Image (cartoon, grey):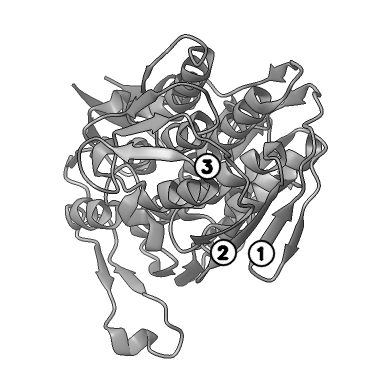
Amino acid sequence: MTYTITKSNKTIQGEITLDGSKSISNRVLLIKALCENDFEIKNISTSKDTTTLQKLLAQVATGQTFDAGAAGTTYRFMTAYLSTQSGTQVLTGSARMKQRPIGILVDALRQLGAKIDYLENEAYPPLQIGEATNFGQNNHIQIAANTSSQYISALLMLAPTLPKGLDLELTGKIVSRSYIEMTLQTMAYFGIEHTWNEQTISIKPQPYQAKDFTVEADWSAASYYYAMAAFADQDLNLKLNGLYENSLQGDAIIAEMMEKFGVKTIFKEDFIYIKKSGEKRSPMFEWDFLLCPDIAQTMAVVCAGTGVQGLFTGLETLKIKETDRIQALQNELQKLQVFLSKLPAKFSKRSQKDYYMLEGKALLDEPQFPTYEDHRMAMAFAPLAMLGDIKIEEPKVVGKSYPAFWEDIQKLGFEVK
């Protein structure tokens, strides 16, 4: 299936109520499963990742085979959770999931005493997870911190339920730190205390306290509306419901980023207004996405659509997402005569960072964009329809995080056929 996306003008006016954050919803679901008493989760995400996690957690008492599909967070959280359960289970996923590494988390869980075997390729799904003996008796473990923060979050949420708690030592450079902090802040809401000294996070054994929880709206989803705001003319007045200035989500930094593109954010109690600031956009946009990798695609498209030169770093984790997002961006931006190029090593010798330069201004001739089984590719490129007609292949992939995306943008005057 392919959608043709068009928009007859550059006006963006209206009101959108965003779905609950997938990242927060999934953390609260795992905490609920680990909590002795029940509680209500309000505004929970309707994303495929979250509904899959709900379904798998519900079948733990009766199931033996668990299929996480393409849901990466779900797979990682279930790997940790099933390690604490009795019996033997198989945890599998989609063809792409079987290409996404899980070895670092498995090694850490094995340090805790988990009994996990690889059923196909070493360090990759699917897994057979057996019943552990003396799980958690070793309470000081190490984990590489330069890959997915979801491995670390999965371990941290188990920590207070372990007999001796957990001292988790992070080795190497910490990526996506904001997501680790999101996990710890969410745990704190449910009464869990921690200390974080240098590279070690320590959590003593303590019970989760059941409390009803309201999930804030998804700032990652908000980023696509900010892209529309960057492409809009002065007739911009957009209200996004459910967003907070003091957010748990690292992607809330999009509001600051977009100031460089002449877009301002007015924060209210539980919603925001997005308007033009009257300031000229900067000729150059430079950002380290280490704390907010999920909005790198959005900002690459914003730079392309506005002709602003971009200098990006902190993209290390993009290669192990739903697709190799760096390669996918390079492929699709090239269709617009925009080029994303890795700079030579000598450029980053002193900083030890990889830098990518984005150059060119988008020239649209009804381009057709594949989505690479990646929801963010579809949604990041969709705002380009304000500059000319575009086609998006396999558009239903947005269901992974934002099922109502196509319906919502039609409220702002986009045509989706």
Is residue 305 shown to the viewer in this render?
yes
Q: Please, what is the three-letter code of the amino acid marked with disc 3?
A: Ser
* Residue that label 2 marks: 170
Measured in 3D between alpha carbons, the distance from the residue under mark 1 to the one under mark 3, in whole angstroms, is 28 Å
* Of residues 376 and 98, the one drawn nearer to the viewer in this rendering: 98
Measured in 3D between alpha carbons, the distance from the residue under mark 1 to the one under mark 2, in whole angstroms, is 6 Å
Q: Earlier in the sequence, mark 1 or mark 3?
A: 1
Looking at the rendered structure, the secondary structure element under dot 3 is helix
Is residue 262 shown to the viewer in this render?
no
Q: Residues within 10 Å of mark 3 (few under 14, many from 20)?
A: many
Q: Where is residue 385 in the image (x, y as percent from the top left)?
A: 32, 38
Task: Evaluate if marks 1 and 2 touch, with contact meaning CB atoms under 8 Å apart.
Answer: yes
Q: Position of residue 131 (x, y in %)?
A: 47, 29
* Residue that label 1 marks: 200
Q: Earlier in the sequence, mark 1 or mark 2?
A: 2
* Residue that label 3 marks: 220
Q: Which of marks 1 and 3 is in front?
A: 1
Measured in 3D between alpha carbons, the distance from the residue under mark 3 to the one under mark 2, in whole angstroms, is 26 Å
